[in-house]
Image (cartoon, rainbow, N blue to C red):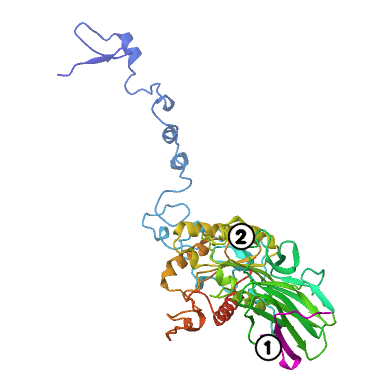
Amino acid sequence: MSTLKRWNGTEWRPVGSDTFLTQADAATNYAPIGSAGTTTVEGLTDATTVGKAVVKAADAAAARAAIGAGTSTLGIGTTGSTAAAGNDPRLSDQRTPTDNSVTAVKLANGSVQNAKIADSAVTPAKLYPSGVTPTAKHFYRGDGIWATPKQPLLGSLMAQNRGIYPASDITSVTQSTTTTSSAVFKRWDAANAYRPVGCTLTQSVAGDANQGCRNSITGVSTTTLSSTPYAIETVASAQTVRIWLYTTVATSDMMIFVDGQKLQPADIVFTTAGVQQVEIVFATARTRTLKVVFSGNQSFVGLGAPSGIFTAPAPAKRVRCAVVGDSYVQGASPSNVFAGGFAQRFAHRTGWDVYNLGIASSGYKAVAASDATTPYNSTERKNALAAIGNLDVIIFFGTANDQGQSQSDVQSAANAAWTAAKTAYPTATLIVVGVESGLGSTYNTLNSWIISAAQANASVDAVLDLRTDAVTYGTGYAGSPTGDGTADLYLSTDNLHMTVAGHEAHEAWLTRRVAAVAMAA
């Protein structure tokens, strides 16, 4: 059965037999049924402001305003005062964006294809980074850098007449082991008489300048370079020219060029050691440019003539090139060192001043028996390279002498040598050539170490591989031909060093490959 309760202002209390609703209680706690009472909307303690506004709204328009519905009747329709249905097609159809309202982030990656780009729509200025003015000389490199094209070294090669000097202008060429007294004589150290070509001259015997000069490079011991070829140039007005020299070995050779042409097809060869003279008598009296290339086993004493003058030519605007290498670069053969080695022939073909820094038995890590300071990466070799000055091209030849060294040692030494060269000559073109061909597959691994290191070294501008692009191949050699390759002609009787024909072939190979190399920036 229900219990009758009354409100006492704080809580509802049961109305018991001992509890009576007084007239005062009724007046205080109960409003008469049907009367207006005293309660208002603002007195609702749990109503929101919007809710109160809806309750107090005088009409529908006021209620819509209270909930932010504006003038809409909230009816379904397509006019400005109605609402769109959930499946209204306008909510899912394609719409044309407002001009300049779509950003790049809204485009799907790879969605813009070539066909969507109008012809000439992308101008060069749009492709260049800020601050770079586009010109016809720029191109975009594969590594994302805008650069200017490099000129190939071919443009720096001087046109040389590879023919032989006209025999009609030569009366005689005579070799002798005695010298002829000459009214005019210019010793090797005479002022303004000669221009050393690709070398520095120093007297052969300390304290005796009359013994002639040999090749020397500052920073490298005379002993080390005692077998490295060198050359001198002079302008001679004499009709008869006598070249005086000493030879320190029984067999050695010499090359003579007149006005850029070789004096005669074969190199001049000496078969005894000691004093030597080569006398050239020309058929006509006129001024000529002479270039004499000496073997490293020869000491140049001077030039003599019955009459006339010898004067140093003005320094030509030639490319200055250094070739670092072993006995191949030096020009060695089983019996002597060739003045006609490929480095000297390369100098003539290109018209460059070529500094021959070939030292027998040396390598990036290997040490020549004659001098313990000869590795390519040694302080002595690096000082020699830096002492030359103003080099435009530096060529490092790989060597079989590093066979037996570890990969890390060879590559570390090679990288250090290349980096030092580029540091000394930051604008020079640095070219690395792999291990010489013709020595068998045993050296392929060593070659791959040098080639891969060079390709990864930022200091190196070009890499030439003599094994994949071989000059010498086959299993034979001079005196033991097998008929299976050029080695029959290009390898000497020691089956190691090159013949004259081998040097000529390597010079031609090197000239063609270097001509295609782009000059360093």
**Is disc 2 surrounded by few (<14), some (14 to 19) or many (20+) residues within 10 Å?**
many
Three-letter code for the amino acid on which mark 2 is drawn? Arg
Which dot marks residue 214? none
- Quarter of the view holding residue 155: bottom right
Residue closest to the far bottom: 168
For the point 20% across and 9% down, the residue is 16
Expressed as whole percent of the image width and height from the top left, the position of residue 199 reads 69, 68
Mark nearer the N terminus (2 vs 1)? 1
Which dot marks residue 164? 1
Give the SS element for disc 2.
helix
Residue closest to the far left: 1
The C terminus appears in which quarter of the rendering?
Answer: bottom right
Left or right side of 463 for 222? right
Give the SS element for disc 1.
loop
For the point 76% across and 66% down, the residue is 209
Expressed as whole percent of the image width and height from the top left, the position of residue 153 reads 64, 74
Left or right side of 167 for 398? left
The N terminus appears in which quarter of the rendering?
Answer: top left
Which dot marks residue 381? 2
For the point 41% across and 72% down, the residue is 441
**Circle 2/circle 1 CB separation < 8 Å:** no
- Quarter of the view holding residue 32: top left
Expressed as whole percent of the image width and height from the top left, the position of residue 341 reads 60, 76
For the point 45% across and 59% down, the residue is 407
Above or below, comparing residue 501 to residue 12 in the picture: below
* Magenta stretch in the rendered image: 162-182
